[in-house]
Amino acid sequence: MSESIHGHEVIGMMVESGSTYTVETLRNAIVGRFGPDSRFHTCSAENLTPEGLIEFLNERGKLTPVDGGFVFGQGQSCGHDH
């Protein structure tokens, strides 16, 4: 199994792309960049699948709805420097 990746890596990818995502397109982007077996952690969760990370971010209000999907809500990260 590969090393766990911090969720901030996914957030950075979202912000850098400037794209609007749906759950499916974000999952595909995560798998494309980090691999299908990648696992993620955050400041308060670990061993998340790509789907689990998306659910985690959504439940915590980190994903802002926009026309056609959602984006990462700027200013919504945990504030830790990872």
Image (cartoon, rainbow, N blue to C red):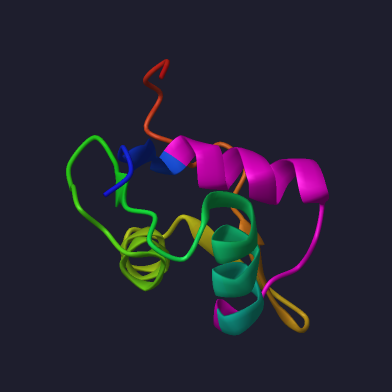
Assess whether residue 12 is covered by the magenta stretch. Answer: yes
- Nearest the eye: 81 or 26: 26
- The residue drawn where x is 77% and y is 41% is 16
- Nearest the eye: 79 or 3: 3
Q: Position of residue 38 (x, y in %)?
A: 39, 55
Q: Position of residue 1 (x, y in %)?
A: 26, 49
Picture layout, residue 22 above or below residue 79: below
Picture layout, residue 47 above or below residue 9: below
Picture layout, residue 9 above or below residue 58: above
Image position of 62 (left or right of 18):
left
* Residue stretch in magenta: 8-23
Image position of 57 (left or right of 13):
left
Q: How many marks?
A: 0
Q: Residue furthest front?
A: 1
Q: Residue furthest right?
A: 18
Picture layout, residue 28 above or below residue 6: below
Q: Position of residue 25 (x, y in %)?
A: 66, 76
Image position of 15 (left or right of 12):
right
Image position of 61 (left or right of 70):
left
Q: Quadrant of the C terminus?
A: top left
Q: Position of residue 63 (x, y in %)?
A: 53, 62
Tell me which secondary structure the magenta stretch mostly adopts.
helix
- The residue drawn where x is 42% and y is 15% is 81
- The residue drawn where x is 17% and y is 41% is 44
**Quarter location, residue 77:** top left
